[in-house]
Image: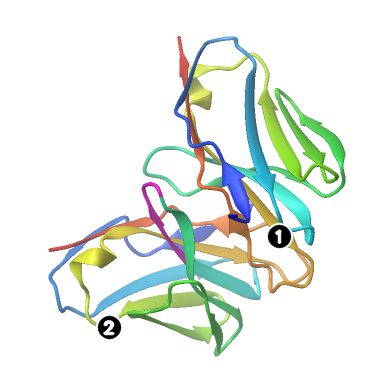
Amino acid sequence: DVKVTQSSRYLVKRTGEKVFLECVQDMDHENMFWYRQDPGLGLRLIYFSYDVKMKEKGDIPEGYSVSREKKERFSLILESASTNQTSMYLCASIAGGGETQYFGPGTRLLVL
Amino acid sequence: QKEVEQDPGPLSVPEGAIVSLNCTYSNSAFQYFMWYRQYSRKGPELLMYTYSSGNKEDGRFTAQVDKSSKYISLFIRDSQPSDSATYLCAMVSGGSNYKLTFGKGTLLTVNP
């Protein structure tokens, strides 16, 4: 089975802090994604990466950056956390040539 | 018009009922269709994946795709309290860097 893990299930941070969310997948997938999920808004794509050191902006990249130094690991960075970034953050991965994304358990981030 | 429309519910049914969940879409390029199940405070998990028009059955679950009407459905037979979750439809066109477009999800409660 594909396994996607995220470094934290719950995180509380202060406004202005730099926040790192880590995602690791164990299936050698080329493509990895970061979403946020908010009530009434559904899943929104922040960034995705189709190869090591490659990244593309999703629909809502403002206030975020990403890093992919190794194939199995995709990090989401909140440069200066703000209260409107309080959300559920979900990481997903997919094999090249595949169509189905596999999700991690999510990180619930609260920014105070 | 949004690319994918999904009735958010909530939908409440008695145990044993047949449940019908639906999504409509506007982009004719969508070729692959998925249903994800998401339990509260967890990441989405892939439930069904279909490509062609028609029906695909897996146990109590049937996924139906009608490309001519741009309409997909998920049927749950003999629904159980453990089916209580949010159901997300998702779709992707070929050659799109595997970016999925999601519906906003339907919250289902199956009452014992």
User: Whole-percent x and y of residue B66?
Assistant: 82, 40
CA gap, disc 1 and disc 2: 31 Å
Q: Considering only vertical position in the picture, is B60 above or below A74? A: above
| Residue pointed to by mark 2 | A79
Instruction: Name the magenta segment's main secondary structure.
Output: strand
Q: Considering only vertical position in the picture, is B64 above or below A45? A: above
Q: Considering only vertical position in the picture, is B9 above or below A94? A: above
Query: Quadrant location of residue B60?
Result: top right
Position of B24 compared to A102: left or right? right
Report the quarter where the C terminus of chain A lies.
bottom left
Circle 2: residue type: Glu
User: Can residue A67 be seen here?
Assistant: yes
Which secondary structure lies at badge 2? loop
Q: Chain of mark 1?
A: B
> Magenta region: which residues?
A35-40
Position of B26 compared to A56: left or right? right
User: Whole-percent x and y of residue A41?
Assistant: 42, 53
For the rendered model, the colour scheme is rainbow
Residue at screen point 54% across, 66% down: A25
Tell me, for residue A34, which label it has, or none. Answer: none
Q: Is residue A18 magenta?
A: no
Q: Nearer the viewer, residue B25 or B62?
A: B25
| Residue pointed to by mark 1 | B92
Q: Residue furthest front?
A: B1
